[in-house]
Amino acid sequence: MTINELQTLLEANREKQFRLTLPGQNLVSVSFHITEVGYVQKSFIDCGGSVHSVQSCVLQAWEGPDAEHRLNAGKIHDIVRLASKVLPTDTDLDVEFEYEDAVISQYPVGSVTISDEAVTLELTAKHTDCLAKELCVPKPKFGKTELSVSCCGPSGCC
C-alpha cells in the first residue's frame, strides 16, 4: 500500500475505528498510538555488487498505558498529513508499520478490511531474499556436469 492509497482510504472512512492485525491474525490492542511517521531511505549493495535504493514511509504503532485511547481513521489521516513536512512529494512511498511485539518489526500492508465499524489493515511479514541469485546461488546439476559454482563459494552461502 502506498501513502496516497492509505490517505485516500482513511479520508473515505474518517469516522471508523482504525485497527491493525499482525501476521497470524493477532489484533494490535485498539488503544495503540501512532507515535512517529517517518521517511526512510535505504541505500545498499547486494552480494553481487549491485547498488540499490529503497524509500518508504514508516508509521510507528505503540501501545501506551492508556487502555481507553482509541484512534479513528480520520485522526490517522491527520497525523500522516502533518508528516508531509518530512515526506517527499515527488514519489508515492510504500507504507510500513513498525510495531514492538517480542521484537521491533516493520510490516507492509497485506490487505484491507472495511466493516461498518472499522478499517482494519492486515499486516504481513517481510522476508529476506538474495538479490543476486543469478550470481550467488549455485546452478542446478544436470547429469554429470555441474553448470557453475557460486560466487560466494561452493556452499552458495553469501
Image (cartoon, helix red, strand yellow):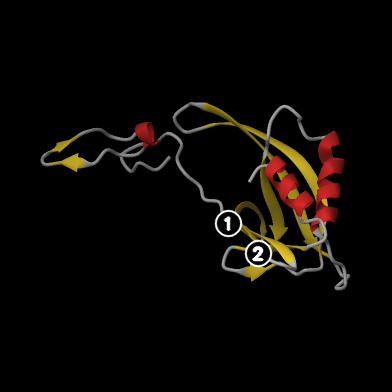
- At x 35% / y 41%, what residue is drawn? 156
Q: Position of residue 87 (x, y in %)?
A: 78, 35
Q: Nearer the viewer, residue 23 or 128?
A: 23
Q: Counting other residues with Cα less than 10 Å from the Cα at mark 1, is it few (<14), some (14-19), or many (20 or more)?
A: some
The amino acid type of the residue labelled 2 equals Thr
Using the image, tell me which numbered label, if any, was put on residue 67.
Answer: none
Reply above or below: 38 against 44: below
Q: Quadrant of residue 70?
A: bottom right
Q: Position of residue 5 (x, y in %)?
A: 68, 44
Reading the image, the residue beneath label 2 is: 21
Pick the front one: 54 or 13 = 13
**Which quadrant, please, contains the C terminus?**
top left
Residue, far bottom:
67
Sequence-wise first label, 1 or 2: 2
For mark 1, give the secondary structure.
Answer: loop
Image-based side of 48 in relation to 42, left or right: left
Report if residue 76 is visible in the image. yes
Splitting the image into 4 quarters, where does residue 83 fall?
Answer: top right
Residue 152 visible? The answer is no
Dot 2: element = strand
Q: Please tell me which residue is depicted at 42% across the width and 34% down the height of the picture.
A: 132
- The outermost residue toward the left is 144
> Which residue is the site of mark 1?
124
Query: Residue flagged by tag 1: what amino acid is it?
Result: Thr
- Where residue 93 appears, x then y in whole percent? 68, 37
Q: Where does the image place residue 11, in percent across and percent down from the top left?
A: 79, 50
